[in-house]
Image (spheres, helix red, strand yellow):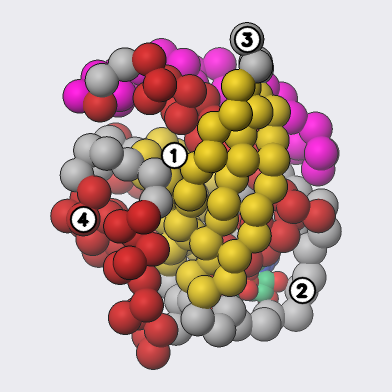
């Protein structure tokens, strides 16, 4: 049976890691090399279909700049998903994800899906964070994990499919079992990295 879920997603992470670019790629299938810092918080919404469910995703794109930090906690409080982004070519942005994850857990406990996202995989020769490091941190914090390139349109749709699968899981199980279910549900999707996903194509 088709039904509609309404979910709030908050995008967090350091300045210039690619939060806006990931959302723009997902929404419009394009990429802008010019950097325009997000001022405060931006809002976009998109409806996506996953299996027999239609999801309305309300996406809150936060600014990585320090001066806007005070705005963020109220958006964390309201969201059922936190997408925490780092740049695989910027080690410090990866280190700083721990603080974001801790903030989200402190506010929402287990009542939140956290997706850790290593962006800019196209910067192959500048990589400072391995897939293993990303995966280990995600496991440590009970988060989903995926690497993306907004520039190449790589793994962007699968990121949102992973999130949709996890949200579907939360409808049928209690929160304490959520992490088990996410593991089981998402295993087939983790293989999607063998080929670059075309924008608009959803592998799930
Ligand atoms: N090479 C490469 N560059 C990217 C990628 N994603 C984003 N960028 C570039 O990185 C810069 C910052 O991207 P944004 O999407 O604005 O980053 P942000 O995290 O939203 O930044 P704030 O709004 O300051 O928090 C821009 O110049 C983008 O073109 C990517 O996957 N690969």
Looking at the image, tell me whether mark 4 or mark 1 is earlier in sequence order. 4
Looking at the image, tell me whether mark 4 or mark 2 is earlier in sequence order. 2
Q: Are marks 4 and 2 in contact (CB under 8 Å)?
A: no
Kindly report which numbered mark, 4 or 2, lies closer to the viewer in this rendering. Answer: 4
User: Could you say which disc has been placed on residue 145 in the image?
Assistant: 1
Callout 3: 10 Å neighbours few (<14), some, many (20+)? Answer: few
Q: Is residue 2 left or right of residue 129?
A: right
Magenta span covers which residues? 176-204
Alpha-carbon distance for marks 2 and 3? 41 Å
Kindly report which numbered mark, 4 or 1, lies closer to the viewer in this rendering. Answer: 4
List x then y, in percent, for residue 140.
23, 39
Q: Which residue in the structure is indicated by mark 2? A: 33
Who is closer to the viewer here, 9 or 97? 9
User: Residue 186 in magenta?
Assistant: yes
Instruction: Confirm or reject: label 2 Cβ below 8 Å from ligand 1.
Output: yes
Q: Quadrant of residue 52?
A: top right
Q: In this view of the protein, can residue 100 be seen by the observer?
A: yes
Q: In this view of the protein, can residue 194 be seen by the observer?
A: no
Kindly report which numbered mark, 3 or 1, lies closer to the viewer in this rendering. Answer: 3
List x then y, in percent, for residue 57.
59, 45
Position above or below: 90 against 135: below
Under circle 4, the secondary element is helix
Q: Which residue in the structure is indicated by mark 3? A: 1
């Amino acid at each position: 049976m088709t039904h509609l879920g309404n979910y709030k997603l908050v995008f967090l992470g350091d300045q210039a890691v690619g939060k806006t670019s990931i959302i723009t790629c997902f929404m419009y299938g394009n990429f802008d090399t010019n950097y325009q810092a997000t001022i405060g918080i931006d809002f976009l919404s998109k409806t996506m279909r996953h299996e027999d469910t239609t999801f309305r995703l309300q996406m809150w794109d936060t600014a990585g700049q320090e001066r806007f930090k005070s705005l963020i906690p109220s958006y964390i409080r309201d969201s059922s998903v936190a997408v925490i982004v780092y740049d695989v070519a910027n080690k410090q942005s990866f280190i700083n994800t721990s603080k974001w994850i801790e903030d989200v857990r402190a506010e929402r406990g287990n009542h939140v899906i956290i997706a850790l996202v290593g962006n800019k995989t196209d910067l192959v020769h500048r990589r400072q964070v391995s897939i293993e490091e990303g995966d280990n941190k995600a496991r440590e914090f009970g988060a989903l994990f995926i690497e993306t390139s907004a520039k190449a349109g790589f793994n962007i749709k699968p990121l949102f499919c992973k999130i949709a699968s996890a949200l579907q899981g939360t409808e049928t199980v209690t929160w304490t079992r959520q992490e088990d279910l996410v593991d089981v549900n998402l295993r087939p999707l983790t293989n999607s990295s063998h080929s670059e996903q075309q924008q608009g194509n959803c592998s799930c």
